[in-house]
Image (tube, grey):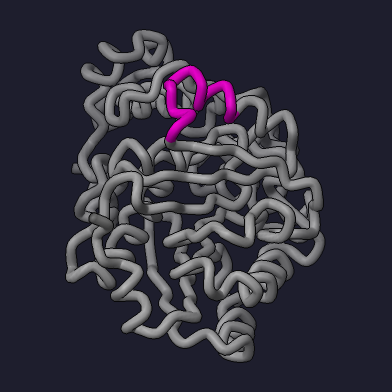
Amino acid sequence: MTEAAATKINLHPRNLHRGRYDFAQLIASSPELAAFVAKNEYGNETINFADPAAVKALNRALLLHDYHIKDWDIPAQYLCPPIPGRADYLHYLADLLGESNGGIIPRGKAVRALDIGTGANCIYPLIGHAVYGWQFVGTEIDKTALQNAQQIVEANQLGDAVELRFQGSPTSIFEGVTYADEYFDLTLCNPPFHASLAEARQGTQRKWQNLGKESNKHKNPVLNFGGQSMELCCEGGEEAFVTRMIEESVSGRDHCMWFTTLISKSSSLPHIYRLIKNIGAVDNRTFEMSQGQKKSRFVAWTFMSKEQRGARGKPKP
């Protein structure tokens, strides 16, 4: 087993992608993947993870084979997320909800999740509904991304499980896309991590170096996972984005059990912890995650007491 394969044990125990990819099965489900599969120096089948087309083909095969999602596609240069890491976030969220449900992970349509910035890929609603049967509302400020996500939802007849809403204000998180009479068990978000495109390009360069693809011909490398500017960066970076999210969460304190968001940079955590404390949240958690060389985490906070969460978390009759 190579080092890359061994690190997959860091994924959540319920993650379907802890083992080595079975390319024979994946190709049987999605034959187009075959064109991107080759043997590495260890004699193991793999793809070139620095090739955006190869990553997209692998994602399409994984979604079809493991989650029965068909006709998945994204426009050129839009974010193509790593499936194992996105699935991990959902599995840890399920554990978090299970704490308020007698240790039993709640499944089915009684659980409602709000995905902030669902993207053209719509990945969290697709996997979350396939694995746990949860209902999702996904919001998005990019109309092209929203239209593509809607096409995926319709192609898989998921209209009763996934509702997509346009966020008309690029500076708002919850305002304008949630209703006063609705309740969510959790929110989730993959925020724009960078403060500028220049910073995003530097991050891309590091990814290429980690993949062993750094060379003089890659002065302006293509990010293997893609991403439009609004997906990758915003003024002030992730710290500013999450600050707005935390501040807006106060007005929804009675309408959501757990607010959560991914945090890419550990340097953002002290500010985020202070802000969560200042707004009066009664509990907060940090879940560490890793996939290969990439380490990430998500932060969760709630305004509901343990007793209130227990009452909310009881299975619906």
For the point 75% across and 59% down, which residue is it? Answer: 172
For the point 65% across and 67% down, which residue is it? Answer: 245
The quadrant in which the C terminus is found is bottom left
Q: Reply yes or no: does residue 70 show up in magenta.
A: no
Q: Reply yes or no: does residue 157 show up in magenta.
A: yes
x and y, in percent, of residue 214 in the image: 59, 41
Residue 263 location, quadrant = bottom right
In the visual, does 105 lie left or right of 198? left
x and y, in percent, of residue 285 in the image: 41, 77
For the point 68% across and 51% down, which residue is it? Answer: 177
In the visual, does 6 lie left or right of 144? left
Tell me if residue 76 comes above or below residue 165 in the rendering. above
Tell me if residue 165 comes above or below residue 51 in the rendering. below
x and y, in percent, of residue 133 in the image: 31, 42
Task: Please state the extent of the stretch shown in magenta in the rendering.
Answer: 149-160
The quadrant in which the N terminus is found is top left
x and y, in percent, of residue 87 in the image: 36, 46
The mark tally for this picture is 0
Q: In front: 90, or 52?
A: 90
